[in-house]
Amino acid sequence: MAQIKEIEKETRADRSEVIRRLLDEGVKQYQLKKAIGMLREGRTTVSRAAEIAGISIWDILDVMHAKKIPIPYSAEDLRRSLKLVR
């Protein structure tokens, strides 16, 4: 509770607003952690992970790069992409 009081003073917000903000931030962190875990286990796509985390595909790619998670891209994906370019 002392930490919440400190945040109230720092942000000049009342207790309910501070708790709402902290809860919102905690949910966002949880969603990102869940999405990253699913990517690591190969249980989701990059676009779906971005959706789960509530961020853009570009942002999830930045997170993947920072956490050294390889982008799942198969040889077949490359062949399809090359056909589209031609």
Image (tube, rainbow, N blue to C red):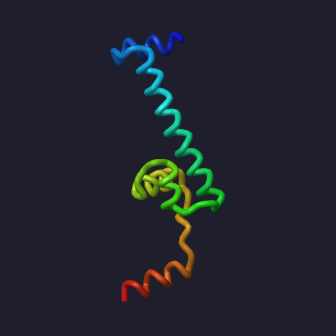
Horizontal relation, residue 61 to residue 44: left or right: left
Viewed as shown, does residue 76 lie left or right of 59? right
Residue 77, given in percent of the width and then of the height, sits at: 52, 78
Taking the spot 38% from the left edge, 12% from the top edge, the residue there is 9
User: For residue 6, what is the image quadrant?
Assistant: top left
79 sits to left or right of 85: right
Residue at the spot x=45%, y=57% of the render? Answer: 61
Q: If the image is split into quadrants, where does the C terminus sit? A: bottom left
Compared to 66, does 77 lie above or below?
below
Q: Which of the image's four quarters has the N terminus?
A: top right
Q: Nearer the viewer, residue 67 or 74?
A: 74
Residue at x-position 66% and y-position 58%: 41
**Residue at image coords 59%, 47%:** 34
In the image, residue 68 sits, relative to residue 77, either above or below, namely above
Residue closest to the far front: 16
In the depicted structure, whether residue 12 falls above or below residue 82: above
Q: In the rendering, at what x and y percent does residue 53 appear?
A: 50, 48
Write down the quadrant of residue 40 in the picture: bottom right
Q: Answer with left or right where residue 20 lies relative to residue 76.
A: left
Task: Report the label total.
Answer: 0
Name the residue at the right extreme: 41
> Which residue occupies the extreme left position in the image?
12
Residue 20, quarter of the rendered image: top left
Q: Position of residue 24 (x, y in %)?
A: 47, 33
